Image (cartoon, coloured by chain):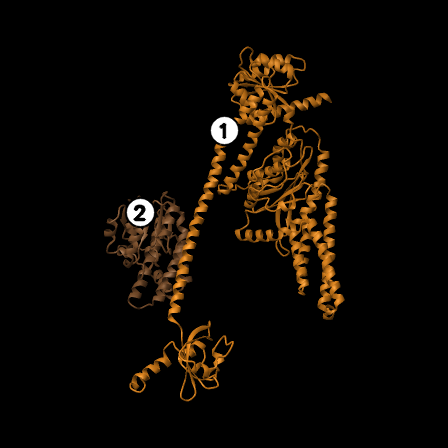
Amino acid sequence: VLQRFTDDDELDVTTVAISEPLYQEYLRALLQGNSTDCARLVTQLLDHGVAIRALYVELIHRSMYEVGSLWQANRISVAREHLATAITEEMLELIYPRLFAEGTVGARVIVATLPGEYHQIGAKVIADIFEVNGWDSHFLGGHDSEAALLKRIDELRPDLLAQSISVSFNLPQLHRVLGAVREAYPMLPILIGGQGLKDCGHEVSQSYLKIDYVSSITALEAWLES
Amino acid sequence: LSHERGDISDVVLRYVVEDAPVYLVVLDPEGRVRQANRYVCELLGFDPVERSALLEDLLIDCCELPDLSALAEAGDGPKLLNIATSGLPKSLSFKFRRTDNDETLMIGHQSLDEIETLQHALLTANRKANNFARDLQKLNAHLHKINEQKNQFLGMAAHDLRNPIGALTIYADYLRRSGEERLSNRELHYLTRMSATSKQLLSLLDDLLDFAAIESGRFKLRPKRTNIVMLVRETIALSQLSATAKRIDVQYRSKTSPIYVMVDPSKIEQLLGNLLSNAIKYSASGATVEVFVAEHGINPQATGQAGRYVSFAVRDEGVGIPLAEQWGIFRPFTTTSTQATAGETSTGLGLAIVQLIVDAHRGHAWVASREGEGCTFFVCIPIEFLEDTDRQLRSSESAYRSSSAELINPMVVATYKTIAPQQAKRLSDEFLEQARSLLARLHHEQAGDVGGQTEVQDVDSARSRESLVRETLAQIQGLCMGVGAERLLMKCQQSLRAVQAGKALELDRIADVLEQTQQTLSTIDWTSEVANEGITAMKQRPRVEASASRHDLINPIDPSACRVLVADDSHDNQLLLTTMLQKAGYETLVATDGKQALEVVRECWPDVVWMDVNMPRMSGLDAAEQIRAMENGEDLVIIAMSASSTETTIARAKEAGCDELVVKPVQSDTLVDATSRHLRALMNRRAGLSL
């Protein structure tokens, strides 16, 4: 159930910006459902100028990965996992206003979750990575049909659509969305990614024109670079 | 189960009693709790058996207490009941069973499905809220960027428009002058309009530029220790030009002794310039605009420390601003219904710029006006605002702001009437006296209220009390409105409501305000004092001072009454010099060579001649010599212009009768300075001759 980042983003402990005790303190607060403490720690880190990417990879990603493992090992309940997810989303909203300091590359992207999928943290992080890299990034989550996505594309006229899928169970849904977008906007470049594509990302991307698969934050950054 | 598998039955029973989140209670026929499991004790926070609680103690709503026997016999349908807990109430589904010994078993549980649904709904709502917040943040960042772009655009547009419009002004002026003989009156009128409109456009653009610069944060104060009196008087001198054009008299009415303040002089000059140009814009021809400056100490709070402040006021005799339009007058793009007297236009930015500059100096700006009675703009800034620490600054600033309304409004009234200081004093004294007697009355009334409870119940007394309050309210209202003391008015109204509600009056607060008002009144004596002094000084000041002192700046020559001839064979130079001179308000004439210059001088007798040395047909120096040889030939100024400034050139120019030699190209400042300097000397000579 956890929206997980893929394994390419495994933490390199030699270059961490966030100390272990601080991380443990954050994780403890997260598991206890103490959003006030979490917010305090994140704000402190932001005020100390910690890179947004480090915050995402070393704090958000790592803690949610650990929450997922704890749930899989039956050591925490679904409710607690939901609580941690809700708090993490709150933290993302805390970080979000600080992203806009960057300049713009003049390109616009819509980052969308699949209609009906609940998990949006991963996609939000991806949207933020775009924003940090100077893109005009718009997140679309919590919508219930591909019509909402098409309407948003019509409004914003993005240069790119980044479509996430969090569980492979929803692959038919992904195909439906991609088909609808392709039909309406044949030339719109699309990126796909997310845990749901872990085993079949390249395969899916090859079955459409102008669709690339990115497997991780690192892969996305390489794509942006190129 | 209990018969065949006794061991399991024990385990299940123990689980239900000890661990399970199931509500289990055994009630006797009277509804008293005989047994309860651990979950019930935990929910309640106590053991209901120990307290011999009744069924009604366990339930919350109980509009009708369920009939136990009826419930037990009703069958299997679960009954939803709200139970009391140590925290929030819970809704559980209950079943009731009659036992063999006439007791009732009450078993309840919370619906997991319902909790699940609730959890799901909450999570979805939370996600949506997060996404909305995110959209707002995004939009906010976007708006911020657009605002910056707007300022950039304003700045850029204004800047790029300035030059072409400047060119339009110059060419329209040139066409008008050179075509005077060939063009019809209507055509000339059009050209005049063209040039006037371009000039208006230029000043609007300047406002836009200033505003864009300030808004975009490119506005930095460069504070210097400045003699504010000198600065004010210099600014007045600068505004004389436009004032004279409308025959408006701008007068400085305060002490001339210096007051030193830490301010950014260029910004304060701009601020004063805006206030003065407004005053001139809205004054009718022949009116007087007065400017006051004073240093004073206002005690911002009754117990706070005294601060040092400098205030200036610009008062006009225009039509005034209706009270309803005075609010927000310092906000950008606000214009009032008040019309400029000579059709001048407004961007609605002048006062917004004033406000921004005042804010940067941590000061305060306000207006006092009554329709038909002109208006007075006030600016008050702390003298040493930069030397305070931040903390002190903040506290004194907020204290100052909060109290300034009460403190300053009486001052406004007093200064408003500065032209008749005695009247002002009388008005404020009257105000104080009335307010005091009112306060005493209220005090008395309150004492009566506290002292005798029976009086309050007495109908007649209550009626007279009400009428007293009404009467006093009317008085206060009239008083407060008369002096513009809105906050005091508000406080009095609050107090009235309190009286009507039968609460004790906060008379101390009103007393406080009066105390503050009195303090302020003592500081406003400067207005009458300085006004008197100013008037006396004006009367005593000699008409002409020997040296070119400040006085010259304050009473400059009237350029529009002076004619200046530019003699130059280059059309470009003619255009350039005449444009600069006209900008300074002079009437100009042109000649293209020495011979023509002689003719013009003979016919028009200008006050000043700017004479190019090298011209065809007759050189400038020859022409100068012949002019000096004419009858009254000394009664004008001749300034030679030459590309070289060797000693021989200078000596030859003097020999030919020129007053000065200026090196070409002639800069605008030099042109205007030299013209006015020599003109002044000429006027003095003429005055001497006529005497």
Viewport quadrant of the N terminus of chain B? bottom left
Which quadrant would residue B559 be assigned to in this image?
A: top right
Q: Nearer the viewer, mark 2 or mark 1?
A: 2
Left or right: where A111 falls relative to B217: left
Left or right: where A122 falls relative to B655: left
Provide the secondary structure element on which disc 1 rests: helix
Amino acid beneath label 1: Pro
Vertical comparison of B591 with B38: above or below:
above
Q: Position of residue B342 (x, y in %)?
A: 63, 33
Vertical comparison of A155 with B25: above or below:
above
Judging depth in this view, the residue of B658 and B430 nearest the camera is B430
Residue of label 1: B164
Residue located at (39% from left, 72% from top): B111
Which quadrant would residue B609 be assigned to in this image?
A: top right
Q: Position of residue B678 (x, y in %)?
A: 62, 23
Residue of label 2: A183
Q: Chain of mark 2?
A: A
Q: Which chain is orange?
A: B
Q: Chain of mark 1?
A: B
Judging depth in this view, the residue of B620 and B59 nearest the camera is B59
Q: Which chain is brown?
A: A
